[in-house]
Amino acid sequence: MRVRFAPSPTGDLHFGNARTAILNWIVARKTEDGKFILRIEDTDKDRNDPEAEKGIYEALKWLGIDWDEGPDIGGPFHPYRQSESFDIYQKYASLLKENGFAYECFCTEEELEKRKKKALEEGRPPIYDRKCLYLSEEEKQKLREQGRKPVLRFFVREGEVRFNDKIKGDVVFETKNISDFIILRSDGSPTYNFAVVIDDFRMKIDLVIRGDDHLANTPKQILVYEALSKILGEDKVKIPEFAHIPMILGPDRSKLSKRHGAVSVKRAKEKGYLPEALFNYLSLLGWSSPTGEEILSKERLIKEVEIDRISSAAAVFDFTKLNWINQEYLKKLSDREFIEFVWPFLEKTGWDLSDRKKVEKMILLVRDGVSFGEEIVKYLEVFFKEFDITQLNDKLKEVLDWESSKIVIEEFYKKLKDAEWTKEGVFAKIKEIQKENKIKGKFLYMPIRVATTLEEHGPDLVEVILIFGKDEILKRLKIILKEYYKIEVD
RNA sequence: GACCCCUUCGUCUAGCCCGGUCUAGGACACAGGGUUUUCAUCCCUGUAACAGGGGUUCAAAUCCCCUAGGGGUCGCCA
């Protein structure tokens, strides 16, 4: 089975495209002799960005998708970049023209626009009126002398085009609704609907898996295959199978785009998602395992995902679920791996990380709750923010104003001075306070937490205290006692 | 406007092809409870959907028709 992923290099690889790539790749990897081909569709020189092509390679590699043929590694059907295949398209275009499947059109864009508008107003379908189809050689010559450069249009036959889509099922289009589309621009470059067919044909693609925004393009492409087959012989031209996968939508049910957040592979990487998790989530959009399990390895996905079992309805992208899946994958990392993974996100904050051992302790203390890399910052903020009691909000003050809070904090300060600086040592002091003053539960722990961290919640309190160190904690308690309770201690 | 595609809990989906096993299953989210000093983790419980309307049938989420809503295409973009 030969499949291909054919993005155009116009920006970051989006989740929608990434899913298309994943599905193609999965299909190719199901069998020993399956081939995944990467082709760059860059026929529109105005929109191309060489950086984007590099970005696509990087994004695919990061996701763990490798290709068997492509612009960078070559293959038996090079070129794999459409901009380098122009002579091939021209050759096939001439063939179509010579055999009466294509004709020159000299209409200007302005003329076309005008007539299209008029057709729409009169309630006719806005398709090309074939004005240039019956031009004589002399007329064509004349137009050429006027400096007009013709485009080449495909002659759309009468009747209908039907095909069986692996996902959508039987689809029928009547060709009277299809315009004689342009296959070669006036500068001789090919258009999409023509170039894909030529490339899929020469690259012997068996199955075209792509977004269902291409569904309505498919009859045009089949028409080109038909023409090719009539010219070259039916045994030489095989129309591939098609599988049009539904789009990915944003929460507002419109097509997923940048305004929905970090929806490109690159941005997901930057936010601290694991490639396996994104791969897993994207595979789950429109598909589910018969076992109902959701955390699935690539190997299992290759085995279980069947293209014709993918839902035909569009799916809404849900960051919450991606977060959950990512968290599940994060849990599988060893402590060492987890630290390595989140470290770069901490470096970006500008915090002082020189005491690496200490920072690592902090990380491990909070790792359970982290669902993506960047989130580590939020969890560690408590350790790095300034101790500024003007930050005390009403909620925090309420805790400090509990009748017993003053005693707890004062006692804690006194006892801590000669505490053994271990978990057991600090814990023993808290227990002493509990016993001596008959204060327990949140009335015991909350005041201490607030007084030491200015937070209501956080990781294990004793661990947090140990990480701060005795000097810092005593300093903080002293400030609270002095500034808040107006108690002088030594 | 024309053509095509789509429509099950808030979200992803199972079931639909081959009507009864569906008082519609799972997961995420949410709510409640338990564990925990708190948060998180973990465990338990719960709320919640067949777009609407007609048919066919003893029986319809499942088959047929219509309507509505959403999306896509109609480019010298891909």
Image (cartoon, rainbow, N blue to C red):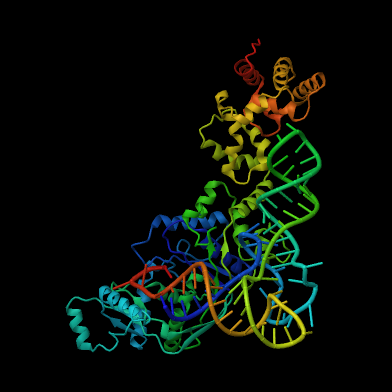
The quadrant where residue A466 appears = top right
The quadrant where residue A403 appears = top right
The total of numbered circles placed on residues is 0
The quadrant where residue A8 appears = bottom left
State the quadrant of the N terminus of chain A.
bottom right
* Residue A457: x %, y % from top left: 66, 34
B57 w.r.t. A277: above or below: below
* Residue A81: x %, y % from top left: 42, 66
Residue A302 appears in view: no
Q: Nearer the viewer, residue A463 or A102?
A: A463
State the quadrant of the C terminus of chain A.
top right
A40 w.r.t. A186: above or below: above
Q: Nearer the viewer, residue A82 or A100?
A: A100
Q: Nearer the viewer, residue A308 or B50?
A: B50
A169 w.r.t. B50: above or below: below
Residue A186 appears in view: yes
A413 w.r.t. A151: above or below: above
Task: Give the side of residue A130 with respect to residue A175, left or right.
Answer: left
* Residue A382: x %, y % from top left: 60, 31
Instruction: Name the residue located 29 percent from the left edge and 74 percent from the top edge.
Output: A113
Task: Give the side of residue A316 with respect to residue A195, left or right.
Answer: right
* Residue A419: x %, y % from top left: 74, 18
Instruction: Name the residue located 48 percent from the left edge and 70 percent from the top edge.
Output: A213
